[in-house]
Amino acid sequence: MKKIDFYFDFASPNGYLSLQALKKYQAEMDLEINYIPVLLGGIFKLTNNQPPMIAFGEVKGKLEYENLEMKRFIDFHQLSNFKMNPHFPVITLMLMRGALAAQQEGFLEEYINKMSVEMWENEKKLDDPDELKAAYDNAGFDSEKIFSLMGAQEIKDKLLNNSSAAAERGVFGIPTFFVGDEMYFGKNTIEEIIKRF
């Protein structure tokens, strides 16, 4: 079995794009994806990192190139359903606590797949509790149960601990992947990962 650890937060459009690209390879290969929910904002604080729009905002041509590179990735992997969320950046604290609730209940992968669609295809403002509940219901999840679980201290602590452990492992942004002890950062490393299998 080929296994990839995928540090994931819905906040990153590149996380969504990586997810969709990996799902295609997962269908073709004997590939296990171990999703590890983390809070990107927390990782930024722990590693003194910044979002690209801030970190590179004053670098001539950098953000324009980032957009071009994203378009190339979308075209190559035929991810035409992607839409840049008009509410970006969306605060994903509730979403990520919900992911850990889903993990606890045994449906994390389904949760990630469906909520990624709500965020990056259906353009929902998922840091609004009412919109989030509606998105859960639309996806066929029990919104009341998830909201109840995400308020538990153990879920809050798990998200903090996941994020801290990620930073200690070397993670500084999303998407980050590990194959064994080897780290890969960024969606464009997916092809390199797949080739090594």
Image (spheres, helix red, strand yellow):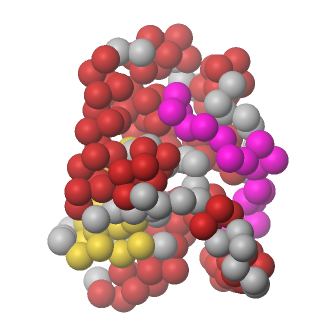
The N terminus lies in which quarter of the figure?
bottom left
**Which residue is outermost to the left?**
181
Find out whether residue 86 is within the magenta segment. yes
Find out whether residue 48 is within the magenta segment. no
Magenta span: 79-95
Q: Residue at x 65, y 20 (%)?
A: 129
Residue 20 visible at all: no
Residue 123 in the figure: left or right of residue 183: right
How many badges with numbers are in the image?
0
- Across and down, in percent, residue 73 comes to 65, 78
Q: Main secondary structure of the magenta part?
A: loop
Q: Residue at x 77, y 79 (%)?
A: 64
- Across and down, in percent, residue 61 comes to 76, 84
The C terminus lies in which quarter of the figure?
bottom left
Instruction: Judge whether 123 appears above or below 52 on screen.
Output: above
Q: Residue at x 26, y 39 (%)?
A: 161
- Residue 106, located in which quarter of the rendered image? top left
